[in-house]
Amino acid sequence: MRPILLSGHERSLTQIRFNRDGDLLFSVSKDKIVCAWWSANGERLGTYNGHQGAVWTVDVSPNTVLLATGSADNTVRLWNIKTGECVKVWDFPTAVKRVAFSPDGSKLLAVTEKRMGFLGTIAVLDINYGENLEDQAAEPSLKITCEDSKATVAGWSFLAKYIIAAHEDGSVSQYDPKTGDQLLNVQVHEFDSQINDIQFSSDRTSFLTASKDKSAKLLSVRDLNILKTYPADTPLNSASITPKKDYVILGGGQAAMDVTTTSARQGKFEARFYHKIFEDEIGRVRGHFGPLNTIDVHPAGTAYASGGEDGYVRIHHFDKSYFDFMYEVEREQMRK
Amino acid sequence: MAPSFEQLSEQDLHEEEEEEIDFSDLKAQFEVKADEGLDTFVVIDGLPVVPEDSKQKLIKFLLRKLNTVGNTSEDAVFMPVSDKGMSEGFAFVEYETPEQAVAAVKQLHGVPLDKKHTLAVNKLMDIERYGREGRVDEEYQAPPVEPFKEKEHLRSWMGDSSARDQFALYRNDKVGVFWNNKSNQPENVVDRAHWTQLFVQWSPKGTFLASVHPQGVQLWGGASFSKQKQFPHPFVQLIEFSPLEGYLTTWSARPIQVEEGQPILTNEEDGKNIIVWDIESGKPLRSFVSHDLAAPPTGEEDVAPKKKVQWPAFKWSADEKYVARMLQGQSLSIYEVPNMNLVGRTSVKIEGVSDFEWSPATVTREGVKQYEQLLCFWTPEIGSNPARVAMMSVPSKEIVRTRNLFNVSDVKLHWQSQGAYVCVKVDRHSKSKKSMATNLEIFRVKEKGVPVEVVDSLKDTVINFAWEPNGSRFVLITTGEAPAGAAVGPKTGVSFFATEKKGSTAGNFKLVRTIEKKTSNGIYWSPKGRFVIVATVHSQSSFDLDFYDMDFEGEKVEAEKDLAANLQLMKTVEHYGVTDVQWDSTGRYVVTSASVWTHSMENGWNLHTFSGNTLSENPTEKFKQFLWRPRPPTFLSKEEQKQVRKNLREYSKEFDEEDKYAVDIANTAVVETRKRVLSEWVAWIRREKEIQAEEKDVFGLPEDADSPKHARDAPIGGSDEGEAVVEEIVEEIIEETEEVIG
């Protein structure tokens, strides 16, 4: 599994996303630039310039028409993927830490930071794919305010039935995207250990959290029950579920601020593969020399990419052995 | 208008009752207690009866004593005089503070005033409390005998059917005891949060686990690790068991302050640092003030040098009959146990005594019939007298062997575990005091006249030395001078010594081999001998552990054929940041660990076999201590042990089968769980899908509700419906020919 090394960013990566077809990879970093890459060979397609601060988050609309980015310059920007133009800018009072399109692409949520007296919010924006892409709603259609503990990340369930948000205190909540009411709130991780990422399974019935408490958990979207737990020996920044094979990929590493003060041996800057159902660790991929900040899997399950604090994105296309590996029990199940 | 009595209804009465305020808390706070204020008074009894004229004289005389513990004056002493003009033999004294009164009771009670009279000092309040008639029952009432309670078997762990060993693990705030399951996950016995506050320690035969708290030491034991014994030594910091688990020594830097109402500690213990406890009764045998070691000289006079405690302060003889303590440079106090009296009523004065060690086993010297315990001590050069190493027999306190040494800078005494040899490691300096060298002088204790063998002097200083347990071989590590200003320490050399083969008695000690250019500093022998680990511990740059076999069953090097050893390096293992190496008491397994007490990098413990095969690695956050539970000595006789060794093959066959069976069982169990987990997962997915389909129906959403909106309203990129055809041209060279034209 020879990785393709993408060295287009000057600062640490914050998020990477494949588009729905998996041919493009979008990456954002603290250097204010948004990059688009061909996932097959790692060639850079282009950049989207305009943000005035570190870009925290990126998401692609399901039809690969629009790209949404959220930044520390307190804006969410919408880009025309094909032309590279910025079609819309929404201003917020604080930085935007996460954006996510709904499964059908008709809505976009933005998680804003709690700062300067403003509470953290989740804003829902309606997206229009009409003739003129610049014609977008000026104001959010809904605003959920997180009064207890700020939301760090959020996403949409199947059918956009719920908004799932993960919080700084290690809890996960379920919101109704029509009313903005909190339906459930469950403390799934150790108290006060921030959840850094949530990513959904391809059918969006379950999602995976990655927390500072050194574990990742697979939760049911419907009732927020913990289905599986994947323990690691290092704080986790990102976790992703692989389609096609029942694996999960976890990434993390010693907190970036402590890296320089201790030996490199301790860093644990590896991507870890666990079996999704049996919770066993089955492999690790080395390469980054800083913590892994973000991981995304190709929607077809044939490759994965990781972005690190070291400023590199590494795309790995899986080998045959990856697809061949199977537990004896799984093989039996297959035969049936 | 207030209602008159007649008009008061039943209800009103009740209201009044309810409104009555509960004053009891205030009462308790403000009530004047008759006792209070009398705290400063003591009653002194046992005084001589004197005529009124000489009363003042007596008071003056008494005051001298009374003022040693606090402040009082002539006016504050009241001595009643009877009708006959004679004093009554008692007096009331008022001190300035209650503390002084308490001190007077503590320190003056039972103190003789003169030959005939002994002071009896009590607090006035106590006289009130107990002295009145009827306050204390006149008739003796036997304390009720507690019904017999079955206690847990303290050695239950020895009965494990597969003879596994236990270990204690202290990490973060939790202490747990586990069964060692080789490469499998250890099986938990108990795991308790905040079980100890400083550290844990097993007793030498594994019966008790001691936890250390500010209130004292607590011993735990039995199958469920219930409370066994308690030793309330406040702020205890160090503990030490006697070799047969009969006694416990505890030390705290703070002198003990005995508070009233403490049932176990008495005034005897007040102001002391060290207590020797009898474990069986849970009572102190005797307490001592610790001798502080002479502080290392510091350049500046005004800086108070840090005091260091000498630990273990008390060293036990092998059979626990004697315990000895050294007063640095002056004397050796040997106490008989359990009465804790000095042997022969006096300490042994030894000018300059610097260190001593008891023989770890009871040895019988050739030609000596009576009972004795041996100890070794040494004194440095004083004036023109040479340095001296001597062996003393106890209880006779006779010196049975001495040896004079010159140019000595330091001496270390190493007893072999059976007491057969004492190796005296002598660090010598040259006349100019510039270079150092080490001599080994080995006393052969069991041979007639205790001959001393000098092992050829080593040019380098020896930094570590260890005897093979129950054997006659040893390993030592030498080091050269550290190059000035070098960041890394000097290289070390590891030397193995064995005796020459010579009939039944052990021959002279000879060097087997020296392995140079190592960084090693620790020697860890298997408790059963033969195998030894030479390791680099507490180092920042190297962490290698070399596993050696001293009786390798293979070809022997020609040059070493006369020696009772065949040295072979079996394996080298690395453990990053290793701080401790510990063998289990059977010599089958060894654990290397990196404790957070030394550094905070990659803490945890690794389990290896005796031959260096790593069985498991256990990185553990905030790992502090790993302790194998010691085993008591075997009950099998020498013959029985031999028999076992002879039939080892049969036994091992049995155990191999058991192991295989266990593995099979474990494998089937794993497969079964996986099957279950997988079917549960498949069922969950199916159920989710069904619910989702129902929901779609309810909402009237189409099947593809979640698919992106492209065909309908996305003008850009939406036109490529259907399958996309990707053409790829691949050129392949089938044949290549080269023709030379012309």
Image (cartoon, coloured by chain):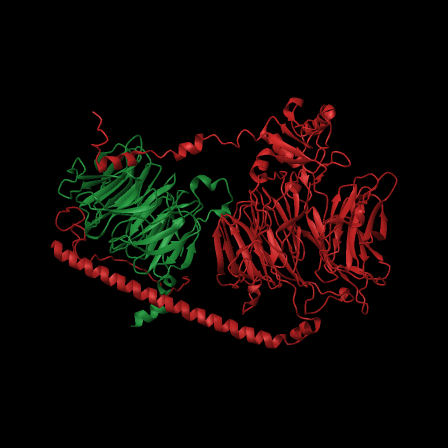
The residue most toward the front is: B84
Q: Nearer the viewer, residue B519 or A39?
A: B519
Residue at horizontal 30 percent and vertical 72 percent from the top:
A335
Q: Position of residue B52 (x, y in %)?
A: 71, 25
The residue most toward the top is: B75
**Above-or-below relation of B431 to B656:** above
Residue at horizontal 70 percent and vertical 35 percent from the top:
B46
Q: Is residue B411 visible?
A: no
Q: Position of residue B708 (x, y in %)?
A: 18, 51
Q: Which quadrant is home to the N terminus of chain B?
A: top left
Give chain A's shade. green
Q: Position of residue B394 (x, y in %)?
A: 80, 54
Q: Which quadrant is home to the C terminus of chain B?
A: bottom left
Q: Nearer the viewer, residue B116 or B191?
A: B116
Residue at horizontal 15 percent and vertical 56 percent from the top:
B696
**Above-or-below relation of B261 to A250:** above
Q: Nearer the viewer, residue B315 or B288?
A: B288
Q: Is residue B196 visible?
A: yes
Q: Position of residue B306 (x, y in %)?
A: 66, 35
Horizontal side of B302 relative to A47 (left or right) equals right
Horizontal side of B693 relative to B473 (left or right) equals left
**Above-or-below relation of A82 to B444:** above
Q: Nearer the viewer, residue A292 or A181?
A: A181
Dividing the picture into quarters, in which one does residue B6 lie?
top left
Give chain B's shade. red
Q: How many numbered circles does the render carry?
A: 0
